[in-house]
Image (cartoon, rainbow, N blue to C red):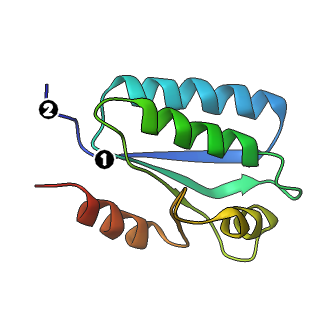
Amino acid sequence: MSPSPVVEYAVHGVWSHRLGVDVVAGLRARFADAPAGVIIDLHGMTDDDAASLPLWLAARRAAAAIRPTVPLALCMPATTVLETRLRRIGAERLPIFTTMPEARAAMAARIPA
């Protein structure tokens, strides 16, 4: 079974437990489709204290556990608390981009034709 194309998943709203539950369900559905990669667009999400950080790390672990591995990337504005904290722990764990075109280009470069 060959992977489906790269999937883009946009998250909108103020981070909360409820939004987290919705995001987990959405990511499970995307991973079930065996995508070639997943780009999560967080430009529409507000998370002033980076409370969502554990979820993004868990999503990265889940994507890495799938066989074949699903490349995962986040797209978010620079200078947010979440972006700062994710970069501090190491962007190589979870690639972060500030624009969707950057994320798409990087994802395309990672996925064999």
- Is 30 positioned to the left or the right of 13 in the image? left
Q: Residue at x 10, y 55 (%)?
A: 113
- Is 52 positioned to the left or the right of 78 in the image? right
SS type, badge 1: loop
Q: Residue at x 81, y 66 (%)?
A: 81
Q: Residue at x 50, y 62 (%)?
A: 95
Query: Label 1: few (<14), some or many (≥20) within 10 Å?
Result: many
Measured Cα–Cα span from mark 1 to mark 2:
12 Å
x, y percent for residue 60 = 54, 43
Where residue 7 sits, quadrant-wise, is top left
- Is 42 positioned to the left or the right of 81 in the image? left
x, y percent for residue 73 = 48, 55
SS type, badge 2: loop
Amino acid type, callout 1: Val
Judged from this view, the residue extending furthest toward the right is: 49
Where residue 79 sits, quadrant-wise, is bottom right
Where residue 100 sits, quadrant-wise, is bottom left
x, y percent for residue 65 = 44, 31
Of residues 74 and 57, the one drawn nearer to the viewer in this rendering? 57
Above/below status of 71 relative to 87: above
Mark 2 = which residue? 2
Mark 1 = which residue? 6
Judged from this view, the residue extending furthest toward the left is: 113
Amino acid type, callout 2: Ser
Of residues 55 and 101, the one drawn nearer to the viewer in this rendering? 55
